[in-house]
Image: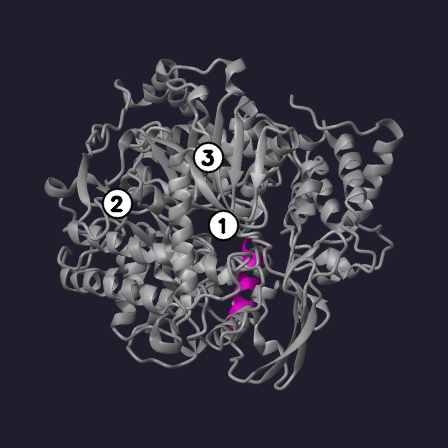
Amino acid sequence: MKLTLKVWRQEGPRAAGRLVDYPVDDASPDMSFLEMLDALNARLLTKGERPIAFDSDCREGICGSCGFLIGGVAHGPQRLTTACQLFLRHFREGETVVVEPFRSRAFPVIKDLVVDRSAFDVIQQAGGFISARTGSAPEANSIPIAKGPSDRAMDAAACIGCAACVAACPNGSAMLFTAARISHLSLLPQGHPERKERALRMVHEMDRLGFGSCSNHGECEAVCPKGISIDFIARLNREFVKASAVETPGPVRKV
Amino acid sequence: MDLNARVPSGPIEKKWEKRRFEMKLVNPSNKRRYRVIVVGSGLAGASAAASLGQLGYEVLCFCFQDSARRAHSIAAQGGINAAKNYQNDGDSVDRLFYDTIKGGDFRSRESNVYRLAEISNAIIDQCVALGVPFAREYSGYLANRSFGGAQVSRTFYARGQTGQQLLLGAYAALTRQIAVGQVRMFPRSEMLDLVVADGRARGIVVRDLVTGELACYAADAVVLATGGYANAFYLSTNALGCNVTAIWRAYRRGAFFANPCFTQIHPTCIPVAGEHQSKLTLMSESLRNDGRIWVPVTADDTRHPGQIPEPERDYFLERKYPAYGNLAPRDVSSRAAKAVCDEGRGVGPGGRGVYLDFAEAIGRLGEDVIRERYGNLFEMYEQITGENPYRQPMRIYPAPHYTMGGLWVDYNLMSNLPGLHILGEANFSDHGANRLGASALMQGLADGYFIIPNTIGDDLVRISPKDRLRDDHPAFQDVRRQARERLEKLLSAKGKRTVESFHKELGELLWHGCGMARNEKGLTAALEQIPALREEFWRDVRVSSEGEEFNQSLERAGRVADFMEFAELLVYDALQRDESCGAHFREEHATPDGEAVRDDARFAYVAAWEYAGPGQTPILHKEPLEFEYIHLAQRSYK
């Protein structure tokens, strides 16, 4: 099949970028979008041109490495699908597709479609953990957890940290990502001792890093390849408000 | 050369306890003076870095991905084994030990495997404490499912994303240590070489994948947790970035490489769809709990699966292995699938596929139960193939998945080079010639959470942090210069072929010459073809001219260059091991019905290879395997 790609090319973080047209003539409907880019890159390289830089690793939708805007939508037109799992059978013959990096103040472009998402790691470092020292755990079945909350914790924990939610949000908010982590840990009894500090620290860190606020557009949920529900944002808000009434966040301590 | 595994004496159930007592300790206030490098942030690397940080060591952790959370452990689907016996079905540490030794076809070290089984329960405890949302029953207690090669139900799981959840648990523990300053994390950083001086590992040379800068990092010990090498086959279930470079470079610096020919071909992967394919996708072994594997009875039957009546279907695993049925171990199941396809009974494009059918389970349990158990796997299958597995059977075919071989380690997980420790899939230690399902996650976390934090002190206490080399020491500068020269050579090749085209050619060569079935003729031919391909690679490869900065084609070229060297050792080892065992199937050594025939008199050893210099035949060292507790027998799953 044939497609025309308009791909964002940007040499480096400070270089100006622009859209460049690339006709693709020999694609197959059973190719993934990234495999089509692989083939295009092979052609560019053989012609002595610079290949298109993009992140990807597992190519089965779980590592969260890949992700850019395809036709203006994070991860492309197919719901509940990462870019690496998007197959060309979902495109029309002759379609023109614009391909751009995730745009967010907190995610500077490194090159072409590659952005720096390390701000997500920094949010995690603010409190996205349970401080259980290795070796100190009690017998696993000594903490029964009702199936319902446990399953909901898993729904939240399914987040792959790809950052599509931020890219889709008109405010560039990282609320869905942060809410998923806070909800996962607050739904489980093991997460309760640090529950309040966690909510405060992670939200403050998110604000500090330049992510915007949530104003309930719901775009994040719509593009999330793992279907993380914005209900978790409501849960985050409750956690944050309850914690704000009784605590002020301090730094993470060694012990 | 000393190949002493340093296994503690005494009864097997006391060995680990004995070792922990006899090891020297580092004083708590001295721990912060020692610096430890951890390369890799998968289950083994992240759990090690977090746990070593908690103990007070200064830890530097490196990964090539943009975040530690993306290491390929994340893609493990099915589960993690532990001998909890929550099902009251007869499990025990002894049984997990026995199943693992037998599953590995008697080519692993008894003492290490026993310790793994012993530690397995503490791993589940630790993961639950860290908030891993394992599947639960309505009682609120943990649920289990069955995996191949076992007749008990001992696998803990989190839907089809167990690896993801375990890794996020370890990653969370790691981020905490980063937050308190115990661990410095270096993402988008790739280890290019190991620095060895006076017989001890001293540090590493790392390329910053964004700036292209080559930096030296010195430490008191180096821990490699860099995963396996299944990508030598090009098409595998591994992530695109998985590579052999770290352990291959360590091998070239003197670490022994053990049993490289033990490569696991996973039976249930989505078949190849076309030339453009960049990787293969696993469909978890857990699907074999409810899915039935079959092909048509007659060759070249092109009917739609729904139109093939029961009597004309061959459920070949159930027929050949009635005791284990669809849950026969991976090596056995893969070979059985290949055999029926070789008879012309394969299904799908090219006849390279067999059906994995859920119709019976859906009829028995209802679609909702199947959706709850495997929903995400079914969705993934439909995304890739465009076929709905609730309505028609999945098509699956074996693919390279995991590598049991790796750098040789002693009981303490230290290589033959003092100061160099190897964890997880990167070492050879626990799975023998075939790994059982749900045991990789167990081993990665056993090594990282519970073994290395105990054993590394015994190595560190023998040296003083004052003797740590400075990173401008000539030993470091030499290695960095060599790494730079290799990069420049790749950049200046200016040939006509892409890195991927070479990688693909190497993969096809290995798949045909040293894949699921091997023989002397094919291996000898591969040994002649590999050096020729390697020579062509260096002459005709084309790397993007964008230079040394962020340059993905340069990253891949370096990895493929190392696969080109490593492939020869893989084939050489397969040729040397003139027996069939586990995943290493030599056609010369099979029973009339196609089962592997071991030769314990000649090959009950670990083949540990020593690098002898460029173009030289590697030197074989043998660690004899002695089975004191488990009687050597031909494996039977019938």
Q: Chain of mark 3?
A: B
Q: Label 3 belongs to which residue?
A: B472
On the question of residue B467 being in view, the answer is yes
User: At x 40% / y 18%, what residue is drawn?
Assistant: B461
Question: Can you give x and y, in whole percent of width and height, for residue B349 in the image?
Answer: 39, 77
Q: Label 2 belongs to which residue?
A: B259
Q: Are marks 3 and 1 in contact (CB under 8 Å)?
A: no
Q: Chain of mark 1?
A: B
Report which quarter residue A150 is drawn in.
Answer: top right
Report which quarter residue B165 is drawn in.
Answer: top right
> Three-letter amino acid code at disc 2?
Asn
The one nearer the camera, B554 or B309, is B554
Question: Can you give x and y, in whole percent of width and height, for residue B190 in the image?
Answer: 48, 47
Residue B72 marker: 1
Residue B395 in the image: above or below residue B581: below
Q: Chain of mark 2?
A: B
